[in-house]
Amino acid sequence: MDLAGLLALREALGRRGPVLVLGIGVDPARCAPGAPLGPEARAGAAEAAWRLEAWLEARLGPRRR
């Protein structure tokens, strides 16, 4: 994942701190190294962020705002 993808994920998570992302479904064979992610990959990153947040809240309880 390139910087644009990480920034999209950070925005999807609402800038709530550091994020570790493992496999968001971007096919490396279709991406040149350092190439910006397209809308489909950004949507995948947002979906992965939402699922990660839901998973964490289910296990750790709601986060403090």
Image: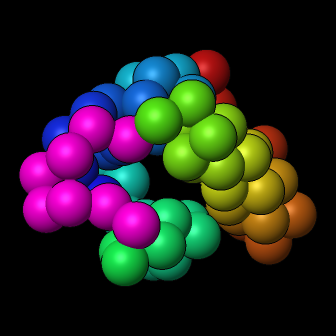
Q: How are the colours assigned in the image? A: rainbow
Per the image, is 33 magenta? yes
* Viewer-closest of 32 and 47: 32
User: Looking at the image, which residue sits at the far left?
Assistant: 34
Quadrant of residue 4 within the rendered picture: top left
The residue positioned 20% from the left and 60% from the top of the image is 32
The residue positioned 36% from the left and 74% from the top of the image is 28
So how many labels did they put on this image?
0
Residue 26, percent across and down? 49, 65
Which SS does the magenta portion mostly show?
loop
Residue 27, percent across and down? 48, 73
Tell me the quadrant of the picture where the C terminus can be found.
top right
Q: Give the range drawn in magenta.
A: 30-37
Quadrant of residue 3 within the rendered picture: top left
Residue 61 is at least partly visible in this image: no
Residue 5, percent across and down? 36, 42
26 to the left or right of 25? left
Tell me the quadrant of the picture where the N terminus can be found.
bottom left
53 to the left or right of 24? right
* Image vertical order of residue 12 relative to residue 51, above or below: above
38 to the left or right of 20? right
* Image vertical order of residue 57 relative to residue 11, above or below: below
* Viewer-closest of 12 and 56: 12
The residue positioned 79% from the left and 65% from the top of the image is 55
27 to the left or right of 54? left
* Image vertical order of residue 33 relative to residue 59, above or below: above
* Image vertical order of residue 58 relative to residue 40, above or below: below
Residue 51, percent across and down? 77, 56
* Viewer-closest of 57 and 9: 9
Per the image, is 54 magenta? no
The residue positioned 37% from the left and 78% from the top of the image is 29
Residue 8 is at least partly visible in this image: yes
